[in-house]
Image (cartoon, coloured by chain):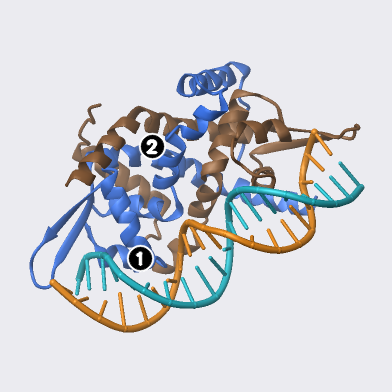
Chain colours: A brown, B blue, C cyan, D orange
Amino acid sequence: MEIETTTDYQKVKVANKIKKMFGHINPRTSMELCPIRDIMALSSDKWSILIFLYLGFFPVLRFNELKKKVYGISNKVLSERLKTLDRDGYISRKMYSEVPIRVEYQLTDFGHSYLKKLLELTEWVDTYKETIQENRLKYKAS
Amino acid sequence: MEIETTTDYQKVKVANKIKKMFGHINPRTSMELCPIRDIMALSSDKWSILIFLYLGFFPVLRFNELKKKVYGISNKVLSERLKTLDRDGYISRKMYSEVPIRVEYQLTDFGHSYLKKLLELTEWVDTYKETIQENRLKYKAS
DNA sequence: CGGCATCCGAGTAGATACTG
DNA sequence: CAGTATCTACTCGGATGCCG
């Protein structure tokens, strides 16, 4: 898999985007208070990524369906993640007071909007995952 | 900040992309072995994001320069992250055997390629960070 | 200067049991 | 069914000291 070189022009464009976002990039106090990093860390941790992907694939899922699909996740962590994603507006939680109780989760429009971007990053990683494996082997050998 | 609704057509497109990436999405054993999630978790954790952004903004940085900029990071963690990013091919590490020693880090073309995608996600978050704050307030109130 | 080794504390994850 | 409660285990981060 060949990586095209990034031109200086493109690098300047990237730098400008960063500058625009973090205009206050120099004063050290501002950057740490900036919420972007923490928001991203919450919505792109290893479990949340899977939750987003599954809800992007299956429009509606119940708690135990998610638990089965997001293999390896515990009740506790799934519950926490869903609560966080609900709180931040990425997913909606609908409870039906039947017996037994039924709760359905799905992406909101906001969540879909985020997933689109997350998916692009995921696709990049998918495209280059072998490259990364090779890089690791090379590194190990050196 | 208004979120445009995602059309059903777009949702199908997203689902297809996911299916293409995780064609083996059903057998529960495959998904967990899939390295994509772990690669993403490594390169989009809260510290790595800042390292990428700073190296995208300042083309070349030394260890202690990064440490000052990535405010709050410890020697140990910075060292670990840089090693991982170097191993995976995102950054290059050049050592000059002067006294005192000088080590320079910069993004590789591979790293620049990744940063471009990461930046798009970051921009999305930057655009909607107020929305997320509002969502949290609404959630708290409910 | 650029780390690595070591130790320690906090937080987080996981397993299990239990409940409305 | 959809969680919560509890406990344990463990990873991870932070601080410090040292060395080439």
Q: Amino acid at mark 2?
A: Lys
What residue sits right under mark 1 in the picture?
B76
Residue at x 91% of width, y 32% of height: A99
What residue sits right under mark 2 in the picture?
B117
For the residue carrying disc 2, how many other residues have a C-alpha within 10 Å: few (<14), some (14-19), or many (20+)?
some
Q: Are marks 2 and 1 on the same chain?
A: yes
Q: Position of residue B109 (x, y in %)?
A: 23, 39
* Residue B16 seen from this side: yes
Q: Nearer the viewer, residue B79 or B117?
A: B79
Which chain is home to disc 1?
Answer: B
- First in residue order: circle 2 vs circle 1: 1
Residue A105's image quarter? top right
* Residue B3 seen from this side: no
Q: Amino acid at mark 1?
A: Lys
Q: Residue furthest left?
A: B98
Q: Position of residue A87 (x, y in %)?
A: 69, 47
Residue at x 57% of width, y 17% of height: B12
Which chain is home to disc 2?
Answer: B
Q: Nearer the viewer, residue B76 or B6?
A: B76
Q: Is residue A131 left or right of residue B45?
A: left
Q: Tags 2 and 1 in contact by the CB under 8 Å rule?
A: no
**SS class, disc 2:** helix
Q: CA distance from mark 2 to mark 1?
A: 27 Å
**SS class, disc 1:** helix
- Relative to residue D14, is residue B113 depicted above or below? above
Residue at x 88% of width, y 33% of height: A100
